[in-house]
Image (tube, rainbow, N blue to C red):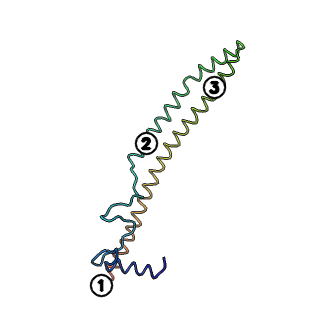
């Protein structure tokens, strides 16, 4: 944006013209008319926490219940192999693949849970930062307004 365009927009806002706020209004950045919040800054912490909790529970269940049949399968594969059945080796490979899949699924659920926990922390931190920054700008703005009033 060129400087002239910026000055024109500031004048329109201050004067209540073309899209400005009437009556010597103030500029509002990142705001929705009526005092609402911008959609890009909203998140539902309860929904994220609930999804993260379910992912964590699934992580725990997959870790416990998914590995349950491993000992019996290993024993059966060993017994079949000992009796010279080709099925013993195949059963061992199936069990190894099953173990890999269980670990992958448990890891994925853990990553989802951890990622949502991190997202909640980041959003909270970002929101606090935005509030502190905007509050600081508002204080500066008020101080400038106060100085302007004293000069009049």
Instruction: Farthest residue to the front: give it.
Output: 18
What residue is pinned by disc 3?
94
Q: Position of residue 95 (x, y in %)?
A: 62, 25
Q: How crowded is mark 1: few (under 14 residues within 10 Å), some or many (20 or more)?
A: few
Report whether 1 appears left or right of 10: right
Mark nearer the viewer, 2 or 3: 3
Instruction: Farthest residue to the bottom: give it.
Output: 152
Report whether 91 appears left or right of 3: right
Q: Is 4 drawn above or below residue 56 in the view shown?
A: below
Q: Which residue is drawn at 39% across and 58% down?
A: 39
Q: Where is residue 144 in the image (x, y as percent from the top left)?
A: 35, 79
What residue is pinned by disc 2?
51
Q: Residue at x 42, y 46 (%)?
A: 48
- For residue 85, what is the image quadrant? top right
Report whether 3 appears left or right of 88: left
What residue is pinned by disc 1?
150
- For residue 8, what is the image quadrant? bottom left
Secondary element at tag 1 = helix
Q: Distance between the residues labelled 2 and 1?
A: 55 Å
Q: Residues within 10 Å of mark 3 (few under 14, many from 20)?
A: some
């Amino acid at each position: 944006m060129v400087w002239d365009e910026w000055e024109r927009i500031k004048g329109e806002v201050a004067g209540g013209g073309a899209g400005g706020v009437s009556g010597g209004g103030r500029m509002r950045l990142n705001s929705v008319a009526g005092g609402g919040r911008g959609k890009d800054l909203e998140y539902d912490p309860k929904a994220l926490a609930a999804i993260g909790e379910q992912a964590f529970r699934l992580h725990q269940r997959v870790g416990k219940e998914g590995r349950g049949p491993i000992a019996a399968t290993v024993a059966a594969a060993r017994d079949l192999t000992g009796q010279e059945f080709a099925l013993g080796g195949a059963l061992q490979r199936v069990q190894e693949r099953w173990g890999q899949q269980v670990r992958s699924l448990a890891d994925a659920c853990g990553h989802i849970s951890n990622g949502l926990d991190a997202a909640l922390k980041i959003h909270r931190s970002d929101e606090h930062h935005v509030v502190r920054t905007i509050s600081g700008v508002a204080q500066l703005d008020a101080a400038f307004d106060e100085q302007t009033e004293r000069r009049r």
